[in-house]
């Protein structure tokens, strides 16, 4: 009986200072790398521009994306290499989704008041 393919979460924080075309190219390159390696993109959510928990490269906001995908383990090394050298990527994290983990939410998580650059209107 063939085993179910491993599902991974990729959270991308793209530079808000980069133009939209550059950010779109990063996403297109990630999707192309996944499909070329024999994997598939199961979910691609844009969470929009949000504050970061702390400034990264003097930027306190980033464009957040969540991609869930399947693919071989060699793909992970390729993605890590390409994303780590891209000037348009502030941070990324690839996480193996364990069996029994609840599915990702359909919408972006709420912005937490008090995060870097976010102020509470009541203050």
Image (cartoon, helix red, strand yellow):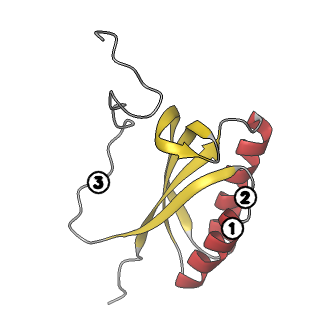
Closer to the chain start, of discs 2 and 3, is: 2
Q: Are marks 1 and 2 in contact (CB under 8 Å)?
A: yes
- Residue tagged by mark 1? 33
Q: Quadrant of the C terminus?
A: top left
Nearer-the-camera pick, 117 or 99? 117
Q: Are marks 2 and 3 in contact (CB under 8 Å)?
A: no
Quarter holding residue 103: bottom left
Q: Are marks 1 and 3 in contact (CB under 8 Å)?
A: no
Q: Which mark is residue 110?
A: none
Q: Position of residue 75 (x, y in %)?
A: 60, 77
- Relative to 74, 22 lies left or right: right
Instruction: Tell me how far mark 1 sits from mark 2, CA to CA.
Output: 6 Å
Q: Crowdedness of circle 2 by 10 Å Cα count: few (<14), some, many (20+)?
A: some
- Residue tagged by mark 2? 29
Q: In terms of secondary structure, where does tag 1 sit?
A: helix
Nearer-the-camera pick, 68 or 122? 122
Q: Crowdedness of circle 3 by 10 Å Cα count: few (<14), some, many (20+)?
A: few
Nearer-the-camera pick, 99 or 79? 79
Q: In terms of secondary structure, where does tag 3 sit?
A: loop
Q: Crowdedness of circle 1 by 10 Å Cα count: few (<14), some, many (20+)?
A: some
């Amino acid at each position: 009986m063939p085993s179910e393919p491993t599902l991974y979460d990729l959270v991308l924080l793209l530079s808000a200072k980069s133009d939209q075309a550059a950010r779109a190219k990063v996403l297109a390159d990630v999707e192309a790398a996944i499909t070329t390696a024999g994997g598939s993109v199961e979910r691609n959510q844009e969470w929009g521009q949000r504050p970061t928990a702390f400034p990264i490269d003097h930027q306190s906001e980033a464009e957040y994306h969540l991609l869930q995908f399947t693919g071989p383990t060699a793909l992970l090394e390729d993605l890590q290499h390409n994303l780590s050298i891209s000037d348009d990527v502030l941070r990324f994290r690839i996480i193996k989704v364990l069996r029994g983990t609840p599915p990702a939410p359909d919408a972006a998580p709420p912005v937490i008041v008090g995060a870097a650059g976010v102020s509470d209107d009541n203050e």
